[in-house]
Amino acid sequence: MTTRVQMIIETLRDHPDQLFTARQLAELFIERYPNDLEEKRNNPRYETIEDLIGQLAAEVGG
């Protein structure tokens, strides 16, 4: 299981010349780490993908 901190580090390392918002990072995490986020995705609190992106963005920004 990849931690959120590892996701941030790996994503930024793989895109050294890009700047990202927390939301953009959240969207990339869903693409890059689908298995790691499967449990969170299946959580009934996140009824839509937008809910999940919002939660991940809050975790990145927090």
Image (cartoon, rainbow, N blue to C red):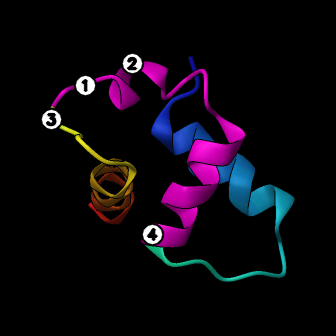
User: Does the residue at mark 2 contact the one at mark 4 (Cβ under 8 Å)?
Assistant: no
Q: Which mark is residue 23?
A: 4
* Mark 4 surroundings: few (<14), some (14-19) or many (≥20) residues within 10 A: some
**Residue at horizontal 63 percent and vertical 56 percent from the top:** 28
Report, in whole angstroms, how far the alpha carbon at label 2 lies from the one at label 4.
19 Å
Q: Mark 3: which amino acid?
A: Arg
* Tag 2 and tag 1, C-beta contact below 8 Å: yes
Judging by the rendered image, the residue that carries numbered circle 1 is 43
Q: Residue furthest left?
A: 45
Quarter holding residue 45: top left
Query: Residue 58 at what x, y percent from top left?
Result: 27, 60
Q: Amino acid at mark 2?
A: Glu
Tell me if residue 50 comes above or below residue 30 in the rendering: below
Residue occupying image coordinates x 25% and y 25%: 43
In the picture of the structure, the residue carrying the numbered disc 3 is: 45
**Disc 4 residue type (three-letter):** Arg
57 vs 6, nearest the viewer: 57
- 55 w.r.t. 44: above or below: below
Q: Main secondary structure of the magenta part?
A: helix
* Percent x, y of residue 39: 39, 18
Please tell me whether residue 51 belongs to the stretch shown in magenta: no
Magenta span: 23-44
Whether 40 is among the magenta residues is: yes
Which residue is denoted by mark 2 in the rendering? 39
Task: Locate the C terminus by quadrant.
Answer: bottom left
**x 45%, y 69%: residue:** 23
The N terminus is located in which quarter? top right
For label 3, the SS is loop
Answer whether labels 3 and 1 touch (C-beta < 8 Å): yes
Q: CA distance from mark 2 to mark 1?
A: 6 Å
